[in-house]
Image (tube, rainbow, N blue to C red):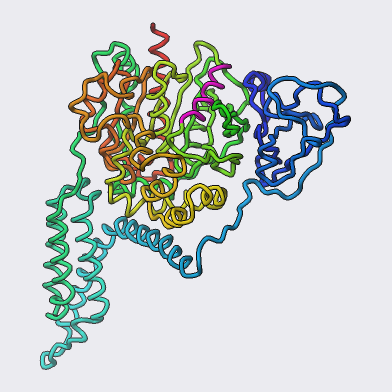
Amino acid sequence: MRLDSSALRFLDELGLPEQHPFVLMGDEDTDDDVQPTTFSNGNNNGIEECLFSNHGRLQQDGRQLFFGERVLKYLGVPVSQSAIPFFCEAAAATTHTTEQIQYVPNYPRNEKIVVEVESALEKLVTLLYTNVPVFLSVAQLLSRMLAPLVVLLTFGYFVIWQKNHHYHYHNQSHDQKPSRNVTLENKTTFYVVSVLGLLSSALLMVDLSYVYEFTRVPLVMLFCVMLSTIVHYSRSRKFLLTIVLPIVALATILVAGDLDLPNISDGFYFDASNNRSKAIVEEWPVENRIYSRGTPWILNGDMRTVIPWLLNSVDVLPHIRRWVPSDVPGDNEAVALDLFFPANGVYYSEKPIYIILHGLNGGSDEPFVQDFVSRQIAEGSTVAVMITRGFRNTPVVGENLPHFARTSDFEAAVRAIKRVSKDSQLIVGVGYSMGAITLANYVAKSGEICHLDVAVAISGALDTREQLSYERSKRIWQPLLARTMKNMLRKKFERKLLERLGRQRFISFIRSSNMASLDEHGMSPYHGFNSTVQYYAEMCAMGDMDLHEFNSYPSTVGRIADISIPLLTINALDDTVGAWRSLAGSDPSKLVHTGNGNLFILLTRHGGHVGWPTGWNPSYDAWQWMSNAAGSFALAVERTNKRK
């Protein structure tokens, strides 16, 4: 990508390294091996200046190289004080230092180290623990998504079968007794279709997402029609007693159970007593916060989550990668920051800068992230996507592995952008799913020293502790998410995890079947949290408040009351990945009045998880609705600021 001088100047002022400041790597766009270096002092009499004052920066072939002594030790490269200069914080020693670079070949980036911790039998058990929940989750998800189609096809089969039966009956000779084989052309097909239809209609009747969508009564009636149709056409009492009756009994038991349906209303919540909030809402077009063009043939939250992923296609845009060193003393880590400029390569300082936090297991190439990026750079904005520490093949040098209660990496990235932006330039944070949780947490924890001007959290949560009791997500969605997350952690950090967790806890970690279990046995103990509840409490904006007791709190209690910038949360009540109770507390109308009234909550009745498909062909608009909602809210804040 050819950059204009304005963009080059912006990058120069940003001052972030092109390579990881603690690991010397090849081209970051490839899977080139890490090339750690050793240095020898030409006269062994010391050095004139500390070569490592900027995280170990040297020049080679006109290119800046970055490394650290810890990297060499981590990779097992011998470190000799006579061969490698002292890593100092100030200038030291004398003169005439010569850098002799020696490459240690074939050290792959975050090399996987095979650790044998299980016997053959234990490996078999782990294999079952790992794969069976994923298989069951896929089966449950597919059965729920296909259930309406199966019911429709079953009724269609009965109509066709009835016509064929009527034709064969009336075309037999009057003295010929009707044949059972003619009446039931294919008994096996009839029984299979009947069972599938009855099970699917029962599933619709007891599944939370369909009950939320259509209410219980119509679905019970549909089940009764299916049952009566099967009884009417079936000629086998044995089939009815041994197959149909148990299904009916089980469905009756399940339908009598309680479903945790949302008891809060969809709509837009804000503090109308706050004049600035009121002005922002006046500037925000109503059509950008109403989800009214949902895809008609997508029937529930699961579909609104999955189908956009399957159908939407977004081109991956070119980017410039820079590295943001951690501000935490002694951390010696850095996160990747992928920068996207408008197609003409110009940096427009009068346009907003967006800083994006991607979802769990994601990166800057996530389709919905690319959708937002493409729309904003088309308007002249610059967009930066921060890659979560250790994700997308980025290295972690030391022991501080990724976890989602950490906000310091994002704060460092925002501070770097803030440092080079104009005073009047809007800095906007946008987060998706897990990134939305981190974004809201950062805004709440940073309070008055927040370096953003506005933030939009999409499909996130304000209280992730509620996820621990959301059983549907644990069964259907979390096994898939946990497997991807666990595979990444094992592939890159297995030895570190084993050393800190210990053998038994490590085995429990690799056998985790959902995200809650993974966090209980892996993330929480590894990072020193006393429990998963404590980890989740530190992860979210409302984590310092007692669960289910928000109604008893005054508006000044908790870090949620410390929000100092406009924070918009966008969620769908039919989100089947996140618990609806985690979205906005028990009363969003009261929650938005906390603190100074800087919290805005948009709850749509439909939309799924990072979905919101629109039109008959959802791939045409892709993620337009949620991208426009986030972008237009930011511009509404910008216009409000200019009116002051």
Residue at coordinates 61% horizontally, 53% vertically from top-left?
112
Compared to residue 296, the image places residue 237 above or below, namely: below
Q: Left or right? Give the position of 451 relative to 99.
A: left
Where residue 85 appears, as percent x and y from the top left, is 77, 31
Q: Quadrant of the C terminus?
A: top left
Region in magenta? 407-420
Where residue 340 appears, as percent x and y from the top left, is 57, 30
Task: Provide the major secondary structure of the magenta segment.
Answer: helix
Where residue 619 appears, as percent x and y from the top left, is 43, 44
* Front residue of 430 and 88: 88
Q: Left or right? Give the position of 401 relative to 572.
A: right
Q: Quadrant of the N terminus?
A: top right
Where residue 526 appears, as percent x and y from the top left, is 46, 44
Residue 434 in which image quadrant = top left
Q: Tell me if residue 366 is in the magenta stretch.
A: no
Residue 227 in which image quadrant = bottom left
Compared to residue 43, the image places residue 296 above or below, namely: below
